[in-house]
Amino acid sequence: MPDSLINDPVNPAVNPVEPFLRSDRMPSIWCPGCGIGTTVNSFARALIDSKIDLQSLALVSGIGCTGRVAGYVKLDSFHTTHGRAIPFATGLKLANPKLNVIVYSGDGDLSAIGGNHLIHAARRNIDLKVICVNNLIYAMTGGQTAPTTPEHSTTSTNPYGVFEPAFNLPHLVEAAGAVYVARWTTFHVRQLTRSIGEAFQKKGFSFIEVISPCPTLYQRRNKMGDGLDAMKFYKEKSKVRNGAPTSEVGLTMTGEIVVGKFVDRERPDYQTLMRAQYAESLGERFVEQAEMVCS
Amino acid sequence: MPKGRVSIVVERCKACGFCVEFCPTHVLALSSAFNSKGYHPPHVVHPEKCSGCDLCGMYCPDFAIFATKVDPAKGGDK
């Protein structure tokens, strides 16, 4: 083995994201070429850059490949039932309003079985940061058609090609009322890091969609190569259009991938409205809930 | 004198090749050696070209590689 392959004993440096990871769980279960690890990397770097207090953070994830993120980050994290990451996160946020709650889950979990929760959390503008890793397929269960699978691609449940129209997630959540909507791919690591940092600053429902390769199922069945080929495809086909109308950013199988920050607006969030309503209706009888102390 | 130094945790690598492809100065290449899982981890072929930008570290899905800036005055890490 060449010398350079061995860990450098004279170099005391450690990976800057190491403090945010449960190193004893590594290597992860994700396939070679999968982009979920890259999104976790960007997320950890956003935590470093934003200097956010880790004690005030909670990460909630659902089921699926991306749902495994909760087990790999050294934060207060919660691996919930399928599709119910947003309801659990809503409960956390309502019980302890000072908590920064992050929902980290996949497209199948958030937009299919959890689709109802996604639109209603956006409608109520609950202060959650949702990171949706979109690999365009149900990956952990064997490559079935997901609501986000582009038309004309091949999956294990549509071997002759998908004929259903796909969800355009940024359009969906903008229409439902999200205050921050962005989309990046795993190729855009720096932009994604910055975007996650911006979402931490927003009060309200923030949604970041990250297009990620699935070399084992989506890329293989559609003869699109491996994870590296997918990254080259993203590099070639993606076009940054900040502020683009979300109705025009739908994904197709081989067409342009519009990325960027689409929506950044202000709306009162759920708890602000709730307090205002109670203060108005109850007047002096309304008492702000006591601060919860976990000991 | 290189401006940066790459560190590789060989046993975590899954040989996706992201770091090799996206290194701006082409410091890395996949080696012919295996790690214990049977993957070919990257190795440094042009250490003098490394700028320490840590883009390899940002792309790595398995947290197996990172780069640090080298302070030329001290001859060590910043």
Image (cartoon, coloured by chain):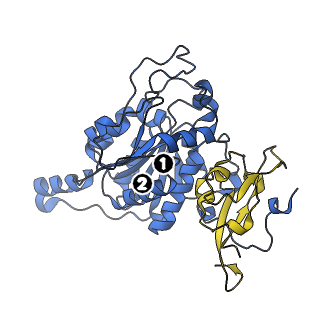
- Tell me if mark 1 has few (under 14), some (14-19) or many (20+) residues whose alpha carbon lies within 10 angstroms of its own: many
- The three-letter code of the residue at mark 1 reads Val
Instruction: Give me the disc on residue A60.
Output: 1
Disc ID at residue A101: 2
View extreme (bottom): residue: B73
Chain B colour in the picture: yellow
With respect to residue A233, does A263 lie above or below? below
Q: Name the residue rendered at 57%, 42% in the picture.
A: A232
Within 10 Å of the Cα at label 2, are there few (<14), some (14-19), or many (20+) other Cα atoms? many
Image quarter for residue A282?
A: bottom left
**In this orientation, which residue lies closer to the viewer: A213 or A130?**
A213
Residue A95 in view: yes
Element on which disc 2 rests: strand
**With respect to residue B1, does A14 lie above or below?**
above
State if disc 1 and disc 2 touch (CB < 8 Å). yes
Q: Earlier in the sequence, mark 2 or mark 1?
A: 1
Pinpoint the chain carrying mark 2.
Answer: A
Q: Chain of mark 1?
A: A
Query: Does residue A53 appear anywhere in the picture?
Result: no
Q: Relative to B45, is A125 on the left or the right?
A: left
Q: Colour of chain A?
A: blue
- The kind of residue tagged 2 is Val
Q: Position of residue B20 (x, y in %)?
A: 68, 52
Disc 1, SS: strand
